[in-house]
């Protein structure tokens, strides 16, 4: 059965394509259901540029900065934003691809002075431990919920099996988003660059629920903390916090955005840039083809 998602509100943009300067119009209280039944593949996902249907075929054109789908109806040449929120206003941030968060999956154990805690239980002001055993307070725990139907491969996380990084790390299987930085040999390496097709690999989409929630831990600086025992980065302001479900909570706490400078460690986002020593230790061959949606 094709996957579906129902939205409570619709923002009609007319024939104006969102470009970052377009503003939200008044919403309609239309209940609209999108269905993944136009690409002939029963995979419960739709990529940007692909067809879906509501009353007829429409195209998933992109996403707002609030992770709302932007739909193009070719029969009328109109654009629409579908949302669960009827209070959006101001300029419409826009992306013509899915969005990543630099985040941990639910259940990830974060080291604190009082022992490991599940990431979703951490609150502003709680202390977490850095990789040098320094206790630092959490400024904010960001929460981001993404839809498998609308984001497809762009939400597909990476699973790092217990012991895959060497020295028994991580201590338990660790699931992070693809661009989350793991710290190895003094380098910050995106998880997707570590894939070896065996004990570090994409989590198959059919193992994921329709809605997946990720969490990021923000501290004062861009720190290294321990996730299931393995060194991993805290949040760095590479993407706007406005993508997160609880962005208003951040504004209520601090009043405005702030920039977090990246730590002074090289970042590797592509597998071809990995040092040979890390390739050999983690049994990473040539960069894999981007065929990541199979079971």
Image: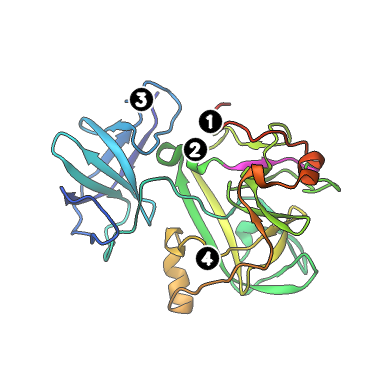
Q: Earlier in the sequence, mark 1 or mark 3?
A: 3
| Label 1 CA crowd tier, 10 Å (few <14, some 14–19, many 20+) | some
Q: Earlier in the sequence, mark 3 or mark 4?
A: 3
Work out whether 79 lies above or below 92. Answer: above
Mark 2 or 4 closer to N-term?
2
Q: Real-space Cα distance between discs 3 and 4?
A: 35 Å
Question: Which scheme is used to colour this image of the protein?
Answer: rainbow
Residue that mark 1 sits on: 293
Task: Examine the rendered structure and indicate whether residue 286 appears above or below residue 146.
Answer: above
Question: Mark 1 and 3 residues: CB-CB less than 8 Å, in contact?
Answer: no
* Residue wearing tag 2: 153
Q: Is residue 13 magenta?
A: no
Q: Who's the residue at 43% across and 45% down the image?
A: 98
Q: In the depicted view, which residue is nearer to us: 115 or 99?
A: 99
Task: Point out which mark residue 234 bears.
Answer: none
Q: Quadrant of the C terminus?
A: top right
Marks 2 and 3 sit apart, C-alpha to C-alpha, by 15 Å
- The Cα atoms of the two marked residues, 4 and 1, are separated by 28 Å
Foreground residue among 144 and 282: 282
Residue at the limit of the structure toward the top, as seen here: 40
Ranked by sequence position, the earlier of labels 4 and 1 is 4
Count of marks overlaid on the render: 4
Q: Which residue is mark 3?
A: 39
Left or right of 199 in this view: 57 = left
Residue identifier under label 4 = 237
| Residue at (49, 74) in percent of width and height | 258
Reply yes or no: does residue 162 show up in magenta.
Answer: yes
Please state the horizontal and vertical placement of residue 84, each as a whole percent of the image.
32, 52
């Amino acid at each position: 059965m094709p996957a579906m998602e129902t939205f409570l509100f619709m923002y009609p943009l007319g024939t104006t394509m969102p470009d970052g300067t377009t503003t939200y119009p008044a919403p309609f209280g239309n209940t609209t259901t999108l269905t993944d039944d136009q690409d002939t593949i029963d995979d419960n996902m739709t990529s940007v540029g692909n067809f879906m249907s509501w009353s007829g075929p429409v195209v998933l054109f992109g996403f707002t900065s609030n992770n709302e789908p932007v739909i193009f109806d070719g029969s009328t040449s109109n654009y629409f934003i579908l949302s669960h929120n009827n209070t959006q206003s101001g300029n419409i941030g826009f992306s013509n691809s899915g969005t990543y968060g630099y985040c941990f999956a639910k259940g990830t154990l974060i080291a604190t002075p009082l022992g490991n805690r599940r990431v979703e239980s951490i609150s502003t002001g709680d202390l977490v431990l850095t990789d040098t055993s320094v206790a630092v307070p959490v400024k904010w725990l960001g929460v981001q919920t993404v839809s498998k139907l609308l984001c497809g491969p762009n939400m597909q996380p990476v699973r790092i099996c217990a012991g895959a990084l060497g020295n028994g790390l991580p201590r338990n299987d660790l699931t992070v988003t693809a661009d989350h930085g793991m710290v190895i040999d003094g380098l910050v390496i995106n998880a997707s660059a570590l894939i070896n097709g065996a004990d570090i690999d994409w989590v198959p989409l059919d193992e994921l629920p329709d809605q997946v929630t990720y969490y990021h831990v923000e501290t004062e600086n861009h720190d290294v903390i321990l996730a299931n025992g393995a060194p991993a980065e805290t949040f760095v302001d590479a993407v706007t916090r406005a993508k997160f479900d609880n962005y208003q909570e951040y504004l209520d706490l601090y009043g405005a955005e702030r920039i977090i400078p990246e730590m002074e460690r090289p970042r590797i986002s592509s597998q071809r840039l990995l040092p040979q020593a890390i390739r050999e230790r983690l049994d990473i061959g040539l960069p894999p083809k981007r065929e990541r949606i199979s079971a």
